Amino acid sequence: MFVLGIDPGLSTLGYGLIEARGHKAQAVAAGVIRTDPSVSVGRRLVELHHDLDALIQEHQPDEAAIEQVFVNRNLQTATAVGRASGVVLFTLANHQLEVAEYSPSAVKRALTGYGNADKTQMKKVVAMRLGLVAPPTPADAADALAVALCHVQSVPARRFLEA
């Protein structure tokens, strides 16, 4: 299974691609797509679409997983992330990719067994599970790899329950 994990954001969108075979998972690529805050929101969303589209065309993932929008006290941030998530979902659907959505606490629970794990714990677990020498950076890329790992771990149970 070749999975694209996404940590959505308008200024910084994290992505991580994982190849999973049996109980082994390997990071293939991870990074971020950044947009310039001085540019209009519409243009930034178009840029996200184009960059994500190119990433999908280059790597050809089988499935995708995205972190659900977390509504916190900052409505402006939640709105921006929601807009970015919409573009991501549109782009993934345009490539006919099956998409799973996971809450931040579900990702943390799946990887650490604790839904309130902090960023440092998550980075260490991601590095350990993927056999990386050091925790992945930046944080958005590490989060995207965590989402992809969560999906890889959750798929067998999800498919069993759907059957």
Image (cartoon, grey):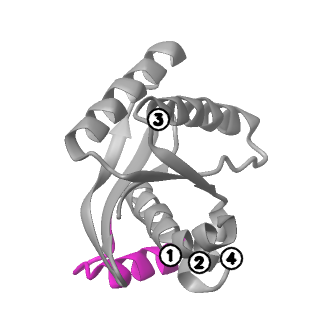
- Mark in front: 2 vs 1: 1
Q: Main secondary structure of the magenta part?
A: helix
Residue 56 within the magenta-colored segment of the rendering: no
In the image, is residue 151 above or below residue 44? below
Compare marks 3 and 4 and give the one earlier in the sequence: 3
Q: In which quarter of the image is the C terminus?
A: bottom right
Residue mark closest to the camera, 4 vs 1:
1
The 10 Å Cα crowd at callout 1, few under 14, some 14 to 19, many 20 or more, is some
Dot 1 or dot 3: first in sequence order is 3
* Residue 105 in view of the camera: no
Q: Is mark 4 on a helix, strand or loop?
A: loop
Please count the marks in the image: 4
Which residue type carries mark 2?
Answer: Ala
Indicate whether 45 appears above or below 126: above
**Stretch of the chain drawn in magenta:** 119-136
Q: Where is residue 24 in the image (x, y as percent from the top left)?
A: 31, 82
3D distance between C-alphas at marks 2 and 4: 8 Å
From the viewer's perspective, is the residue at label 2 or at label 3 nearer? Answer: 2
Observer able to see residue 133? yes
Element at badge 3?
Answer: loop
Q: Distance between the residues labelled 2 and 1?
A: 7 Å
> Which residue is rendered at x = 40% and y = 34% of the image?
95
In this picture, residue 9 sits left or right of residue 22: right
Q: Name the quadrant containing residue 48.
A: top left
Residue 56 occupies which quadrant of the picture? top left
Which residue is denoted by mark 2 in the rendering? 110
Q: At numbered mark 2, what does the secondary structure look like: helix, strand or loop?
A: helix
Q: Earlier in the sequence, mark 2 or mark 1?
A: 2
Q: Do the residues labelled 2 and 1 touch (CB within 8 Å)?
A: yes
Q: Name the residue under label 3.
A: 11
The reply to whether callout 4 and callout 1 are in contact (CB within 8 Å) is no
